Image (cartoon, rainbow, N blue to C red):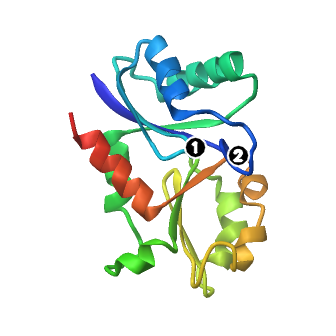
């Protein structure tokens, strides 16, 4: 059985696309997933499954959310091993826990095209820093997300795909949850 982490995009934000975590957990259990655990209200789920296709899993979860809750939600899936790589590939060697609040990882369904990466290269070395490693975009904000000029950059449109972001503390917590049996 493989441990997976599902990251739902845009739920429980600003009173929109409301899903109670217990209801989400129950829905995922009804799909036959095992050891389902959620973390905070922003749509983070750790579960186990015999299924080996991440794209199949995300599609099944997206369809079930639409059927049960009545709206569309993009779901990014990573194995526990892939999430551990996200931690290991970190391009910003920070050690101060306070800095972790300004550090985010955006999860993409596929690696960005060379064309998209070229368009985003201008954001690599400003006060806020962006780095791409595989299917992840790491961002270190100088002050905060809301005070950053990057807040207005349409990354989804430039990349040509839906993305979802989590702060560094959340990514670490999800990996820790995935390691627990």
Location of residue 163 with respect to 47 vertically, above or below: below
Along the line of sight, which residue is nearer the eye, 21 or 117? 21
Spatial separation of the CA atoms under disc 1 and disc 2:
8 Å
- Residue 127 visible at all: yes
The residue drawn where x is 56% and y is 49% is: 111
Q: Secondary structure at mark 2?
A: loop
- Residue drawn 32% across the image and 48% down it: 175
Quadrant occupied by the N terminus: top left
Which of the 4 image quadrants contains residue 168?
A: bottom left
x and y, in percent, of residue 106 in the image: 56, 56
Residue named by callout 1:
110
Residue 144, position in %: x, y?
60, 77
Determine contact: label 1, label 2, CB under 8 Å: yes
Task: Kindly identify which residue carries mark 2.
Answer: 161
Q: Pointer 2: residues within 10 angstroms few (<14), some, or many (20+)?
A: few
As displayed, is residue 133 above or below residue 93? above
Quick one: 114 or 173, which is closer to the camera? 173
Q: Is residue 93 visible?
A: no
The residue lying at 57 percent from left, 23 percent from top is 61
**Residue 146's spot in the image, x, y percent?**
69, 73
């Amino acid at each position: 059985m493989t441990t997976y982490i599902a990251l739902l995009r845009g739920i429980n934000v600003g009173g929109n696309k409301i899903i109670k975590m217990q209801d989400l957990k129950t829905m995922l259990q009804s799909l036959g997933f095992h050891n389902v655990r959620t973390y905070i209200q922003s749509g983070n789920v750790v579960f186990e499954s015999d299924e080996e296709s991440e794209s199949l899993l995300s599609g099944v979860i997206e369809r079930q959310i639409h059927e049960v809750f009545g709206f569309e939600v993009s779901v990014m899936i990573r194995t526990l091993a892939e999430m551990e790589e996200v931690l290991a590939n970190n391009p910003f060697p920070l050690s101060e826990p306070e800095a972790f609040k300004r550090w985010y990882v955006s999860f993409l369904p596929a690696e960005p095209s060379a064309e998209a990466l070229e368009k985003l290269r201008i954001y690599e070395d400003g006060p806020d820093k962006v780095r791409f490693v595989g299917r992840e975009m790491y961002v270190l904000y100088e002050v905060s997300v809301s005070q950053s000029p990057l807040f207005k950059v349409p990354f989804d449109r430039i990349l040509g795909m839906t993305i979802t972001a989590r702060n560094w503390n959340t990514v670490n917590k999800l990996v820790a949850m995935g390691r627990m049996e």
